[in-house]
Structures are given as C-alpha cells and as structure tokens.
Image (cartoon, rainbow, N blue to C red):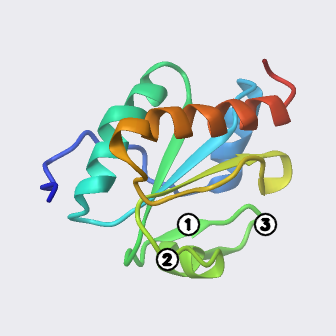
C-alpha cells in the first residue's frame, strides 16, 4: 500500500474562470486534480506528473474532496470544493480533468490511479487530446 507523504502542493483552485483564462492565454488546457488528503495514489499522480507539468508551464489546480473552502465555478457561482466534486459526480481520488473554452471538458477524465507503470501514457494521451481540442499540436 502506498503511503501518503508530504508532497509539493499544487495551487488550490479558487477561481476556475481565472485559472482557465490564464491557461487558455498560454494555449494550454486547465488541468484540475481532485485529491483526497492522505491518498497515497494522489501523492504519486501529483508528484510524478502534475507538479512537473506545472513547473514546465502547464496550468494545474487542485480541488480536495471533503474541503469546504469556497471556489468560483466556471459559471461564476460560488460553492464549496466538496459541492463542486459532487456536482460533477466524482467518486474516486485521484481524478484528473481537462478543461477548455467555456469550462467544458475537452478530454477523457482520468479516474483513479490506473496501473502505475502505464499512468504516464494514459495521462499524456489525454493531455495531448486536450491540447488538440484547443487547436495546439
């Protein structure tokens, strides 16, 4: 079983419209990671894939299950992170989502950790699909 370690944190989602605007200006999708405190698989996905993507100019934010902190949704309405997750029927952590114009999902969600040896390939495939949906090669 994977142990959750202290991990480099991704920016916490506060305003999805603002985060999306920044991503689209850079011609990148907005990547949203749904995480759960203490989730070892979340730590692996965060540390091995998403922190590096953020450092290389990608746009990634994190939303935590069970977090009652407020965020602004793509439609401008305020709700808790927990409510945002329920509204999107997300049941497992980690879940990684890819957003484009209008706050629409532009690639297949990655639900769960998949097989660790293949996660990079699954992630890269969906990230590239999201970029293609934005017209970026």
Left/right of residue 127 with respect to residue 8 in the rendered view = right
Label 1 Cα crowd, 10 Å radius (few <14 / some 14-19 / many 20+): many
Residue 50 visible: no
Q: Is mark 2 on a helix, strand or loop?
A: loop
Residue in the foreground of this view, choosing between 76 and 94 = 94
- Out of 127 and 7, give the one closest to the viewer: 127
Residue 111, how many percent across, how many down?
52, 61
In this rendering, the answer to whether 36 lies above or below 87 is above
**Residue at the disc numbered 2:** 91
Residue 107 pos. (x, y %): 73, 47
Quarter of the figure that contains the N terminus: bottom left
What residue do we see at 12% from left, 55% from top? 3
Q: Earlier in the sequence, mark 1 or mark 2?
A: 1
Residue indicated by mark 1 = 71
Label 3, on which residue? 75
26 vs 85, left or right, is right
Per the image, label 1 sits on a secondary structure element best described as: strand
Say whether residue 60 is visible: yes
Q: Earlier in the sequence, mark 2 or mark 3?
A: 3
Residue 123 lies, in percent from the top left, at: 54, 38
């Amino acid at each position: 079983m994977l142990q959750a370690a202290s991990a480099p944190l991704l920016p916490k989602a506060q305003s999805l419209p603002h985060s999306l605007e920044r991503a689209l200006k850079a011609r990148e999708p907005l990547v949203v990671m749904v995480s759960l405190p203490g989730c070892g698989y979340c730590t692996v996905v965060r540390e091995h894939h998403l922190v590096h993507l953020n450092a290389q100019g990608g746009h990634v934010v994190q939303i935590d299950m069970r977090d009652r902190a407020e965020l602004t949704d793509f439609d401008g309405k305020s709700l808790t992170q927990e409510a945002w997750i329920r509204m999107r029927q997300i049941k497992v952590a980690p879940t990684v989502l890819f957003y484009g114009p209008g706050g629409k999902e532009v690639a297949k969600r990655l639900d769960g950790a998949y097989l660790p040896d293949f996660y990079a390939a699954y992630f890269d495939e969906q990230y590239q699909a999201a970029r293609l949906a934005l017209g970026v090669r």
